Image: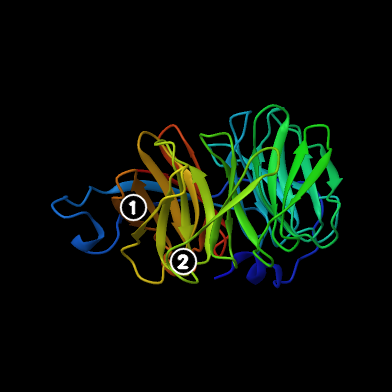
Amino acid sequence: MNFRHALASAALLATSACSSGISQTPHALVPAGSASSFAAGDAAPGAAKFAEYSVPTASAGPYKIVYGPNGTYWFTEFLVNKVAQMTSAGKFIEYDVPTPASAPDSITVGPDKNLWFAEGAGDKIARITTKGTITEFDVPTPSSGPSVIRGGAGSDLWFTERDGDKIGRITTAGKVTEFDVPTASAEPAGIAVGSDTAIWFTENAGNKIGRMTTAGKFTEYDVPTANALPAGICAGPDKNLWFAETAANKIGRITTAGKITEFPVPTGNSEPSVIEPGSGTTMWFSEYTVGKLAAITTAGKITEYAITGGSSSGPVGIATHDGTVWATQYKSDQIVHFTP
């Protein structure tokens, strides 16, 4: 599933006002699949716990999520043009994005301790304070499709322009600079800052992993599996970069020298999309079509956990804090809190 294009085609619903509420459904979460879900010789882990919280606005399409500087979780509501925050107790506050039908996508914490998010259809990068005040900044290239944004060093944040084939930099003052990706129609998607201080990104259509220095010098590396549809990427605890291959059903690791190793996801056709660092040597990723959350260690061991709603849940965004995982459920309009 090409998330950016598939979700952008969904109808954006008109909404207004700020709302809050609490709705929780506890369930038991168990490891998914048979013994083949685990590395040879490993025992299946015991039952884990999670709770699901319903988003106040119906058909909201909760998408990307991050742990905020004020101790709450912030996420975008792709289908209803809102950004929301949620406490760990399940209390929500939603904020309308000023630009109509902006398709809010990725969200991150900036070096200024505000939240920053990309407006895929609005062609803007926006800042929201922890009090809910939103300021929007235009991306210079029209119809650029800003997608994923990450905080960087100093006052900079970095983002991908999926339709514009560019990498963007925005300062906390709102100044935007753009850099052209060498491969035409590459569709840059995920982005992360590496241990080498360079900017690393995935090329959805180009089937490459890109590296860019902060001065704008590019190097690109081919993903070994053809048409893998590389999506989310994050900096791992081992100082490598880890990325999801949505179509190839794999998780990839690339060293800062450009060496790529791929690890197959046990469940077939799971569509891994977003990957984020967890605690210790573990990273977490979502499996959209099969309704699972999965952990991968730096050694490549994958453990999957089935969400109660299964394929009707649609997990996408992931945030980790204090050893637990919070994920958006795009299809079921919920936020799930998972304690391994």
Residue drawn at x 17%, y 50% as measured from the top left: 42
Q: CA distance from mark 2 to mark 1?
A: 23 Å
Tell me the residue that label 1 is attached to: 28
- Residue 269 is tagged as none
- Locate residue 299: give its quadrant: top left
Q: Quadrant of the N terminus?
A: bottom right
What kind of colouring is applied to the model shown? Answer: rainbow
Label 2 neighbourhood size at 10 Å, few (<14), some (14-19), many (20+)? many
Pinpoint residue 321: horizontal percent, then vertical percent.
48, 35
Give above or below for 59 relative to 126: below
Instruction: Compare residues 88 and 103 and report the one nearer the observer.
Output: 103
Pinpoint residue 108: horizontal percent, then vertical percent.
64, 41
Would you say 136 lies left or right of 189 here? right
Would you say 1 lies left or right of 6 here? left
Instruction: Compare residues 183 and 99 and report the one nearer the observer.
Output: 183
Query: What amino acid is found at the position of numbered circle 1 in the picture?
Result: Ala
